Amino acid sequence: MYHESNLEKQFSAALKSIARRDDLKAYVERTPELYVLLQQAASRYVTGETRQEGVAASRRLAGEGYKLSIEYIGENTSDADECEAAAAEMKALIQDLGRAGLPARVSFDLSHIGLSLDKELAYSHLMDLAANANAVGAEIELFISMEESSKTEDILSVYTSAATTYSNLGITLQAHLNRTPQDLEALADSRRRVRIVKGAYQEPEDRAIHRSPALNERYLELVECAIRQGHHVSIATHDEAIVDEVLKNGWLSHGHAEFETLYGVRPELGSKLKADGHSVRIYLPYGHEWYLYLCHRIAEYPPNLYRAVIDIVTKRI
Ligand code: FAD
């Protein structure tokens, strides 16, 4: 497990707030030289700005034997027309994946399609997307990401309402939140698709635990519990201590659990697990909001700043 110094913790918090600054994002967008340089750093984690680039990278990774999750990046959309446009892009993605014959998970934040404006708007876009995915076939799933704890209740309620109609939906749970063991218990009524992550957002002390052995312990308990409940479980982590424990316990042999890693993050880990015969899914993002995504990846692992500088100096896209 990676232990951040105090300075890195402050840096990480600063970067997370930079990611949310619309003025800084606008400045990057209207400064072509800066835009290109940062895009070079982002290209390690983001497949490109367009759906075509996302689908092309998906095809390549599927050819190498990985399963796929694909995300059109975006969150906290505060304009109904933009939510509509984001949902339209996701529908086009579903169609393109279907046409390409690529089994995949389309992952997204509910706040990208309306949750920041109105829960009902997010629900109606989700239902529409689920109907579209259903029409394309069983090989396309929709997967809901988990956001800040202030939204957890709404995200779970939109998901569980939609999941009573559609079975092609999955939900992400964050091990760092103290409420998550109860949330998982509440989903035990039927077999579901569940992704377990540690949690990327900064949360108040009374709601979550930080990166620590206690968090790893809770993470593993959640995975074990989700497998016991019969869910299809994605073990979404780059933490080798967790991976080793999962393998040691033989949890993958149940046939309905898999590892999932982010595109560009510890690719050698995913590749080794796949070579050893384990089921590995790669989470590929694409879209114009790569600035936000790059900030998140550096904030969660500050040494990635070194990689970003090297990529800026050496890469050409
Ligand atoms: P950590 O303890 O953070 O890291 C363990 C080790 O992994 C580190 O020591 C380092 O070696 C390596 N590592 C971790 N991150 C990086 C990185 N960025 N670059 C290089 N090395 C790294 N979070 C949410 O809050 N909501 C979501 O919906 C969500 N969806 C996700 C979906 C997937 C498929 C994955 C893999 C993650 C998702 N996350 C989500 C992010 C997650 O919560 C963590 O922030 C992230 O996975 C890092 O945690 P970790 O489990 O890898 O462990």
Image (cartoon, rainbow, N blue to C red):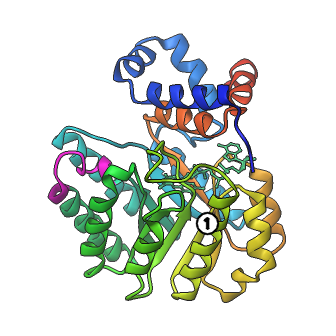
Q: Is residue 83 magenta?
A: no
Residue matched to label 1: 219
Quadrant of the drawing holding the C terminus:
top right
Q: Residue at x 56, y 81 (%)?
A: 225
Residue 300 location (% of width, % of height): 61, 40
Residue 214 location (% of width, % of height): 65, 60
Residues drawn in magenta = 110-121
The image quadrant that residue 169 belongs to is: bottom left
Q: Residues within 10 Å of mark 1 (few under 14, many from 20)?
A: many
Q: Mark 1 falls on what kind of element?
A: helix
Seen in the picture, residue 116 relative to 308 is either above or below; the reply is below
Seen in the picture, residue 233 relative to 10 is either above or below; the reply is below
The image quadrant that residue 58 belongs to is: bottom right
Amino acid identity at mark 1: Tyr
Residue 112 location (% of width, % of height): 31, 47
Q: Left or right of 298: which side holds 148?
A: left
